[in-house]
Structure formats: C-alpha cells, structure tokens
Amino acid sequence: MFETPIDFPALEQRLAFLGLTAAAPVTARLQTVTLPLSQPAPVRAAIAGSSIVSVAEGVSADDEQDALDCALYLEQYTDTRYDRQTQWYEWLQHFTLGLWHFGWIHQRPVMLDSRHIELHEPISSAILETLRPNVSDSLYSAAMYAFEALKDNLQASMLLAQKSAMERGRQFQTMPCAYDANGRLTLMLIHSWYVAAVNPAQFLFLKWLDHDVTLIQHYGTFTLDRKRFDPLAAAMRDKITERSREYLLRL
C-alpha cells in the first residue's frame, strides 16, 4: 500500500506537502549535543490525539518529543485535508507520506502492509500479534507497556476514545519507537480501524466474542533521518497549536 517515491523531494516541496513555511535555519534542537545518559530512561508512553506513542527504554527525551510532535502535527494537519469518516484511505495515505516527508524513511518499495482480523480477543492483543514477528523486542515491549498503562488510566482512555471516534467504530494509530542496531530512532506505524455496533471507551480491551467485527490494519516501519528531519522541526513546532497540545497526555 502506497509505493515509496523514487526521489526524495526538495525542502520546498516537503514544506508545501506538510503545510509548513520555512523557519529559522538553525534551531535550539540542532545545536543540542545529546550526551549518553548515566541511567537508561525508562519505557514511556503517551496519547497524542488518536495515536498511542510509546518509546523503549533508553530513548532520549528529545527523540521522544520528536516522535510525539510528528504524531500530533500530522494528525492536526491531515484532519484539515481529509475527512476520516468518508476518506480514511486518503487520510492514511497523507499521514503516511507526511512521515516520509518529515524524514521518516521506509526502505521497502511499499510503505504499508495490510492485515484483516476477525476479532474475538481484545484489539490490543491483535495489535501485539501484528507487532511480534515484525519488530525488535524493545519495540514490542514499548507497545505492550503502553497498553498496560492504558488499562488503568480512564482519563487517557477517554481522550483516545474521543479522538479516534467514528460514527460506528474507531480509527487510531499505534506508534512504538526504539533505537535500531545503529542507534537510529525507528518507529512502527500500525493504523487500525473497525466498524461495530458496540463502541465503548475502553475499546482496546473488550473481548469481541459476541460481535461480528473485522479489524483492518495497515503497518510499516520507518527510521528517522535526522539530516532530513531537523530542517523542518522548528517549522513543525511553530504550527502545533496550543489546542492540539491539549490532546497530548503522558501515561
């Protein structure tokens, strides 16, 4: 799903695709030197709009913020371009290509694979089943941590339910992040949606034994190229509104 473009676009084209204007060429983030942590940072997770973003142990606070900001901005901007209720395919395409324009690079010819699942067990279990054969242990653990944290956090569950709601169902993203063997920040995007007559706030943990529900997933792995991301970071953060920050809740 969605072929990877052959040529990476120029900065001006990337800004235009993302709805951004050029910012100052040098930012505080670019000037920051990240020193090795004396103690590894723990696993963390947050709800960023309709995205469940988690980072593995050892991921720096700066890299965590970059992933959160990308999720927040891309949802905020893509919502202005496409209606998720009626244009879910176009919405997902723009969100995914937005990651690529920001510098999250996908090495395969097709950006996203797909999977259809007849639900019986909880949605959280179905997502973990998709992750297990496709990601490192650290990425898998980060996703598992996020679901465990959500179980007992009603405020976060309500926020995710609000932002993922469709007329009859949900549409949301799971985005665990970790460093790869070369120390590069990597994320697995899993976009999930379903239609159901029952639509509880704690939809991730409901057993669907008595309901005929199909979960549709599109997923792929992306690695952040900092040389491509850093020139856009300040412009992105300038456009993240205070209102969109209200949809960020750390678990």
Image (spheres, rainbow, N blue to C red):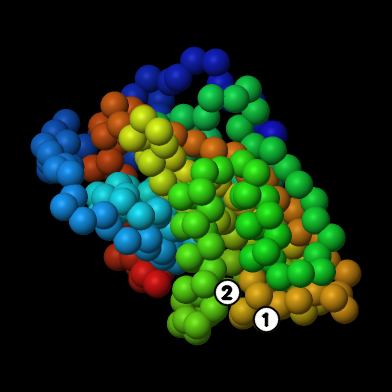
Q: Indicate the amino acid at tag 2.
A: Ala
Residue at 47% over, 73% down:
149
Residue at 16% over, 52% down:
38
Residue 189 vs 123, above or below: the answer is above
On the rendered structure, is 55 left or right of 211? Answer: left
Residue 139 vs 220, above or below: the answer is below
Residue 174 location (% of width, % of height)? 55, 56
Residue 78 in sight here: no
Q: Nearer the viewer, residue 189 or 7?
A: 189
Residue 112 vs 148, above or below: the answer is above
Residue 100 location (% of width, % of height)? 47, 33
Residue 213 location (% of width, % of height)? 83, 66
Residue at 48% over, 66% down:
146
On the rendered structure, is 125 left or right of 220? Answer: right
Q: CA distance from mark 1 to mark 2?
A: 8 Å
Q: Which mark is residue 200?
A: 1
The residue carrying pointer 2 sits among few (fewer than 14), some (14 to 19) or many (20 or more) residues within 10 Å by Cα, namely many
Q: Indicate the amino acid at tag 1.
A: Pro
Q: Nearer the viewer, residue 194 or 235?
A: 194
Residue at 69% over, 38% down:
113
Residue 211 location (% of width, % of height)? 86, 75
According to the picture, the residue beneath numbered tag 2 turns out to be 161
Residue 249 vs 217, above or below: the answer is below
Q: Which mark is residue 33?
A: none
Pick whichever of labels 1 and 2 is earlier in the sequence. 2
